[in-house]
Image (cartoon, rainbow, N blue to C red):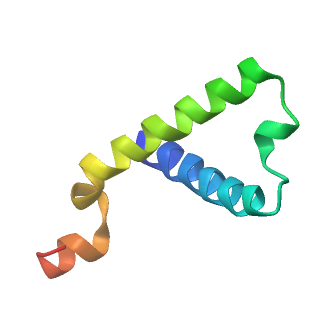
Amino acid sequence: MLHKIAFVLLIIGGLNWLLEAFHYGVGNYLPPTVSMILYILIGLSALYEAFTHKSYCKNCMANGQM
């Protein structure tokens, strides 16, 4: 379950970076505290995925390599 939540947050973070390129990022429309919490959760999700990716990724497990 934690893997799925982290993955969704990473997708949100990636889309936000795309929007930031056009000056429409989520942080521009949320209160500073809320956007800071969101950015922290997305950053922690990225760390979680970086360290646990290989154990959850079906492609990495099937090939035995990354």
Give the image location of residue 61, x and y in percent. Answer: 19, 70
Residue at horizontal 61 percent and vertical 58 percent from the top = 14
Position of the N terminus, as image quadrant, is top left
Residue 1 appears anywhere in the view: no
Residue at horizontal 58 percent and vertical 46 percent from the top = 9
Residue at horizontal 25 percent and vertical 47 percent from the top = 51
In the rendered view, would you say 57 is above or below 6? below
Left or right position of 58 against 40: left
Left or right position of 36 against 55: right
Left or right position of 42 against 2: right
Residue at horizontal 77 percent and vertical 59 percent from the top = 19
Position of the C terminus, as image quadrant, is bottom left
Q: Quadrant of residue 34?
A: top right
Hey, which residue is sitting farthest left in the picture? Answer: 64
Give the image location of residue 7, x and y in percent. Answer: 50, 52
Between 53 and 14, the one nearer to me in the picture: 14
In the rendered view, would you say 32 is above or below 45? above
Give the image location of residue 17, x and y in percent. Answer: 66, 57
Residue 37 appears anywhere in the view: yes
Q: Quadrant of residue 39?
A: top right
